[in-house]
């Protein structure tokens, strides 16, 4: 796992608060960020939007994006990250949507996770990582750690 203390230190240095928008990780990134005492000056909020309806209602993901691309897509990860930024007091937001398993399809295999990273004043970035069929718990942990690494990189 990325050094959460370093993420918090860097966010304090830059005067940035952090928000999370999580689907397949179910709030694991928010838990990691708030496990350290004193994180309340950096962590703003976390959105756990497991259903498509929650993604639309809480983050402003468009129904059209969900229909055209599916929940596990870079388009939706992008909209989730920007939605978290727009609906919070944060200056930096990370989003995660993926297929932790079991299951998946030929087109969206188990272990595929899409990430979005939004920062005020900068272009939102997205990426997809195929962790493979590691099992549900391992995919979720890998996705959490990757999201934390993205936050740390954005703050350096």
Image (cartoon, rainbow, N blue to C red):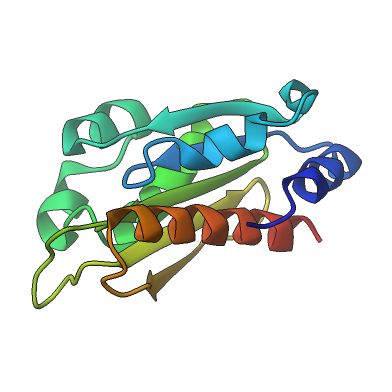
- The location of residue 29, given as percent across then percent down, is 53, 42
**Is 61 above or below relative to 3?**
above
Could you tell me residue 32's position as x and y percent? 60, 39
Q: Is residue 60 left or right of residue 42?
A: left
Q: Residue at x 28, y 55 (%)?
A: 136
Q: Residue furthest right?
A: 13
Please tell me which residue lies in front, 7 or 145: 145
Please say whether residue 90 is visible from this viewpoint: no
- Quick check: 95 left or right of 150? left
Left or right for 149, reference 25: right
So how many labels did they put on this image? Answer: 0
Q: Position of residue 114 (x, y in %)?
A: 37, 62
Q: Residue at x 19, y 72 (%)?
A: 109
- Corner quadrant of residue 145: bottom right
Q: Residue at x 25, y 34 (%)?
A: 56
* The C terminus, quarter of image: bottom right
Instruction: Give the image quarter of residue 123.
Output: bottom right
Q: Is residue 103 above or below residue 45?
A: below
* On screen, residue 44 above or below 101: above
Q: Quadrant of the N terminus?
A: bottom right
Please say whether residue 149 is visible from this viewpoint: yes
**9 and 5: which is toward the camera:** 5
The residue sitting at 86% across, 43% down in the picture is 9
In the drawing, does residue 30 fall left or right of residue 78?
right
């Amino acid at each position: 796992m990325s050094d959460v203390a370093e993420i918090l230190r860097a966010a304090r240095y830059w005067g940035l608060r952090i928000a999370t928008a999580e689907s397949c990780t179910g709030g694991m990134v928010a838990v990691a960020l708030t496990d350290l005492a004193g994180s309340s000056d950096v962590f703003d909020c976390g959105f756990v939007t497991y259903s498509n309806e929650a993604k639309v209602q809480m983050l402003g993901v468009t129904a059209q994006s969900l229909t055209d691309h599916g929940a596990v897509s870079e388009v939706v990860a992008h909209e989730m990250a920007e939605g978290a930024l727009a609906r919070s007091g944060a200056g930096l937001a990370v989003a995660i949507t993926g297929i932790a398993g079991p299951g998946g399809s030929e087109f969206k295999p188990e272990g595929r996770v899409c990430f979005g990273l939004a920062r005020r004043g900068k272009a939102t970035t997205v990426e997809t990582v195929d962790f493979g069929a590691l099992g549900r718990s391992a995919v979720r942990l890998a996705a959490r750690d990757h999201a934390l690494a993205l936050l740390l990189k954005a703050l350096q």
